[in-house]
Amino acid sequence: MTEITEVPSPFCGIGTDDLTIRMDGVSLKVVENGCAVNTPAFEQMITDTSPRVDGKEVSLDVAVAAAAALLKDTRLPVIGGCATDVNGMRGLLALADRCGAVVDNMNFTGARNNFLALQDSGWMNTTLAEVKNRCDLLLVAGTDLEAFAPRFFERYLWNKESMFLDDTSSREVIYLGKAPSGDASTSPTGRKALVLECATEDLPEVIAVLRALVKGQPVLAASVCGIAAADLLAIAGKLKAAKYGVVTWAAGALAYSQAELTVQTLSEMIKDINNQNTRCSGLPLGGKEGDQTANQVCGWTTGYPARTRFSRGYPEYDPYLNDTNLLLTNGEADAMVWVQAFNVKSVPPVTALPTIVVGRSGMTFAKEPDVFIPVGAPGIDHAGHAYRMDNVVAIRLKKLRDSGLPSTAQVLNAIEQAL
Amino acid sequence: MLIKLTGGTVYDPASGIDGQQQDIYIKDGRIVTKPAEAFQVDKEYDLKGKVVMSGAIDMHTHIGGGKGNIARTLLPEDHRQDPVMRSDITRSGCGHAMPSTFVTGYRYAEMGYTSGFEPALLPVNARQAHMEMADIPILDKGGYVMLGSDDYLLRLMTAKKDQKAINDYVAWTIQSAKAIGVKVVNPGGINAFKFNQRKLDLDEQNAHYGVTPRDILQVLATAVKEIGVSHPLHVHGCNLGVPGNMQTTLDTIQGIGGLPMHLTHIQFHSYGTEGDFKFSSGAARIAEAINKNKNITIDVGQILFGQTVTASGDSMRQHANHKHASPNKWVTMDIECDAGCGVVPFKYKDKNFVNALQWAIGLETFLLVDDPWRIFLTTDHPNGAPFTSYPHLIRLLMDRSFRNEVLSTIHPEAQKMTTLASIEREYTLQEIAIMTRAGAAKLIGLKDRGGLSAGNWADITVYTSNTDRQKMFEKPDYVFKDGQLVVVDGKVVSTKWGTTHTVKPNFDPSVEKGLKDYFDRYLTMKLGNFKISDDEITEDGRGSITVHPLRH
């Protein structure tokens, strides 16, 4: 039995790297600094160690050859999931380039709300260490932050010391839209967050009014979707009075049509505040199961985020048309490759198409894929790199145990070689 | 295998060879002397009448790191103008302003470049920069680690820690980020922006720390010198793009008191306030100061007309410049109590007075600085223009009539405000070779690169001389990288992976005590997880690390 300290996690997206993990053979137990997201992800048992073709156990070589054979004469294979580490994404993109595939990260439809806003008007953002040391006001828009990242408040808001605040417990937290599901946002001295609730689909209206108030526009309505205009005016005042306000949202939580306009309104509001002689920054949440990793590596390899096709011999980005589900529904795709090295519960959409799964050991299927190759989890079974939510920090993932499972990169490189 | 390059006209300033006919022998990736005994040549290239130089080195080009990837993500419409097909030996991607990594490697090599150095490696983002550069084929690469707005340094300075403490921290940072030099960007200004300061002059105090840019330059330039790093402190000065910043630049040169200092993209820091538009060229006075102060080196950061994107660590100035964004979208970031960045797309127009004069200021600088060993050819890719415009820039420098032809087409008021038309100088091939090869290798401290004498790595470019220098430099006949033929007639014919150039200055290991405490209290990762280990660069079997000697 051994204990490993300072273990970084690729699962929660906020880059926690203080986990202590006890290891007994290949079974892991998080003994310090676990959370509802990280603990089960680390403790997930290894089940399959052999690949399967048509449900029968085979060697890795046979499975790789079978996968290559399935892909060989396809016209538009789709590589979905894209949940892996940097080297896994490198292998995935090389394979996609080789076989003219569509690459589509499974969280892209949520992340698209951010990308469309970014690509249309840009933003002013910050990162976690700046939040930890500077943030005096946190506005959480439409997101249950502690359900998203259980340790966010403990690590980045209620930290004992900060360089530029005398007392971190004096920070103010405001929720707009969704109410928090627990008490993590309550300060150590007992101060509760201010919560202004509205329905998620009412956020566009509420946030548009908030931006207008930040800009000093007159608003005649007394209330907006159940929130008093005076309360919104008070928030606008707090944002302008803060020294380093931070506005956070999870693009995927804004689950309504054209939510990119909400992200854009928030981002433009932040720019407006910076033009009124104070600082304010955005903090988009994300980074779970390799979504930032997928977009970063696809970004430097192709120029585009991870919803890009190679079917014409060069990368083409389309945030709508390259959607896996759409390609399956419309009958455009002719094979499915699902890459998911983090989460055994995240399985490919059920399809009649030839399906190859390169998935974390422990995955179970309602419909057995044609080829299943179990792989190790980055940061547990092999070393690697993963991006945290703020995109700036790539964390170095450690190899914790010798499971004998191959990495995503090894498997995808082998399939590409076999082609 | 022994390769012989026969009869080429060699320009090798590192050995003082200026256009002499020479044979070159290559064995095991390096240039060797002609074997004394009987020998068999396995492959011979007849280079009679061809121009031979070592592979070019871009000493300041933004090819790795987060701001570049933000720039890519921001501009899908720019990529769509220049899709790049895959081939049997090359990967697909995109080109133009901020090319994909693979295309970056191919296009540099296709112009005869064999190395590129990322000048703004944020310590906390260095891992990403190295990962991106690991996906740039053919080229060698390296980076200058960015300090000067990091809270740790400013805390050391406010606490009046001695120079040794700062030296240890700088050396530790170079090692942990796997860098070959140190850069400072808007010294202290990126930090001041986080405290809502919107400008910071050379002698203006940071509102929180009380230190000035001048103080920061002094301690960092001293540290770089004392820990023995060859490349002088690489300085992106205060007040980038501000009319009148010529005076800041002159004061910066004066203020460094003879310490080695490299002023980067100096074109953006050479502006006066004369004329009807209160914007004028300071190039003559800057060049005079460069000529006089032998401790100073510069690269130009030439602008060339067209669409590009500016990606800089200077969040303060980039925020101020966002109103010039074209198309109108832009990003700034505050980063990890470490640094920041700003990404603003720009379209430089020859009919815009300011842009036209910026173009002329850059060229004046090239032509008025006497010593080609102390000036380097850059566009600050992609900030002044994409690196693919270098052959055009070389023609502007080597061909006065072409230069004056272009000059006659720019904004008429800008023509009146520049002395360019009267400058007769034309760069020679040898001077181009100094700026882009021997001088760059010397400045960065690259051992066995940038020269063609025996012992050097065989990074070699062969051109067909052409009076149209743009045509000549955009399509080399051959490019060899570490002795491997990678380009023929301006097209990649094979690929390989270059090395990562670094230095490893010594530090007192006790420096980690203070750092560990700081990381645990204030930062978001553990010190042990912050440092980049060698295997992160080498473990995939493609990358390698080359450690260059320190200055003694």
Image (cartoon, coloured by chain):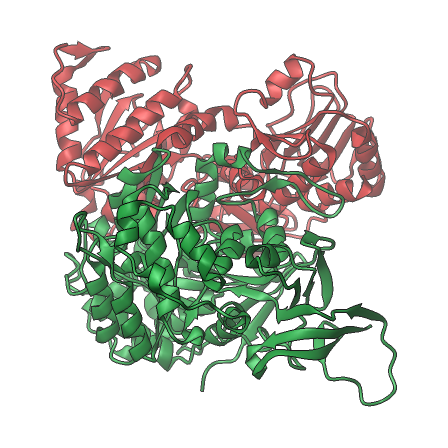
Chain colours: A red, B green
- Above or below, A220 against B398 in this view is above
Quarter holding the N terminus of chain A is: bottom right
- Above or below, A155 against B445 in this view is above
Image coordinates of residue B405 in percent, x first then y, are: 43, 52
B386 or A182, nearer to the observer: B386
Image mark count? 0
Q: Dividing the picture into quarters, in which one does residue A176 lie?
A: top left
Going by the image, does A394 lie left or right of A327?
left
Image coordinates of residue B471 in percent, x first then y, are: 60, 54
Going by the image, does B529 lie left or right of A274?
right
Image coordinates of residue B261 in percent, x first then y, are: 34, 73
Residue A75 shows in the view = yes
Q: Dividing the picture into quarters, in which one does residue B55 lie?
A: bottom right
B13 or B543, nearer to the observer: B13
Which residue does the image show at 21% across and 74% down from the upper left?
B255
Going by the image, does A408 lie left or right of A282?
right
- Above or below, A79 against B123 in this view is above
Residue B314 shows in the view = no
Quarter holding the C terminus of chain A is: top right
A242 or A279, nearer to the observer: A279
Which residue does the image show at 49% across and 64% down from the upper left?
B398
Q: Dividing the picture into quarters, in which one does residue B274 lie?
A: bottom left
- Above or below, B179 against B348 in this view is below
Going by the image, does B344 lie left or right of B112?
left
Image coordinates of residue B514 in percent, x first then y, are: 32, 68
